[in-house]
Amino acid sequence: MIETFQQPLPGGVTLDCRACGRVGAPKLMLLHGFPEAAFVWDEVMERLAGQLRCVAPNLRGYAGSSSPLEVAAYRARHVVGDIVQLIESLGTPLDLLVAHDWGGALAWNLAASRPDLLRRLLIINSPHPATLLRELQNNPAQQAASRYMNELCEPGAEAALAADDFARLWPFLGQGDWLTPALRERYREVWQRGLTGPLNYYRASPLRPARSAEDPLSALALPDEVTRVAVPTRVLWGELDHALLPGLLDGLAQWVPQLSVRRVPESSHWIVHERPDLVAQEIVAALPR
């Protein structure tokens, strides 16, 4: 059974969390992406409840969590800081951190900067910042696939996405059979609570396609010493992802020495919904032995 609770953090933010499993069991945290919320992990957590204590927060800006309006509040040091404080409130280290999409961006950052907080990392369709920067600077196909990021940063993006019952937001999720009427309603309920927080992640990030030759992205560099992840890491990647192309995996071991990758040719970016059994199996395989 899924529990819900509000977790106040020392920095003043409160995160709305979903959880299941016995307190005292090995600890697992799951981080969602855009345009999701913590509920996307429910099926996976229920499959693992007999073995693990699973906690899935709604990130800052989502659903019932604190949602500051200013873009600066969504810079990496703040949103990653929320997760650091949440992990510390649960007791460190986590046995495994699992993350998808924007949650993965936080998880890569956290694993590089605070490896003491987790024993293992499982990333699902979320690019490492160094490979994302490389592809955005050099790969025209990834530049084109990521163009939507700039559209999400426009001042009127909230209204445009919400118009006509979120007609421009549903296509982000594709047309898979997994998107049932009941699940559509859960997404609708989350989106109706506000889109500014979720969109501010894009607005606060420098990692999006350059608009011109003078764009700061062209000169941006990420030192290896701040992006190297020493934590043993497993990557699960649905290769039918149209926004995050498989080239993002090329050369990843340069920054993640203890790396294993499983590619799933028949799955998309939404593999958590499409294959919850497989995701649960990968989580068990990624746990420390």
Image: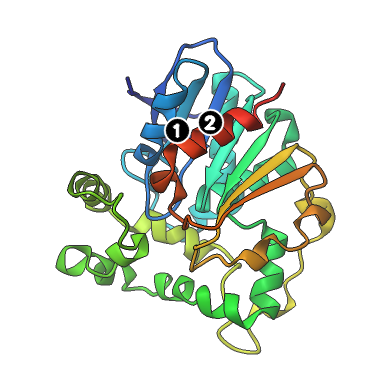
Q: Name which residue type carries label 2.
A: Met
- The reply, left or right, for residue 89 in relation to residue 156 is right
Q: CA distance from mark 1 to mark 2?
A: 6 Å
Which residue is identified by label 2? 29
Q: Position of residue 228 (x, y in %)?
A: 79, 49
Q: Position of residue 107 (x, y in %)?
A: 61, 44
The kind of secondary structure element at disc 2 is strand
Circle 1 crowding by C-alpha within 10 Å: few under 14, some 14–19, many from 20: many
Residue pictured at 37% horizontal, 44% vertical: 37
Quadrant including the N terminus: top left
Q: Nearer the viewer, residue 97 or 114?
A: 97
- The reply, left or right, for residue 80 in relation to residue 112 is left
Residue pictured at 24% horizontal, 46% vertical: 183
In the current view of this chain or complex, which residue is farthest to the front?
266
Q: Position of residue 103 (x, y in %)?
A: 52, 47
Residue pictured at 33% horizontal, 23% vertical: 2
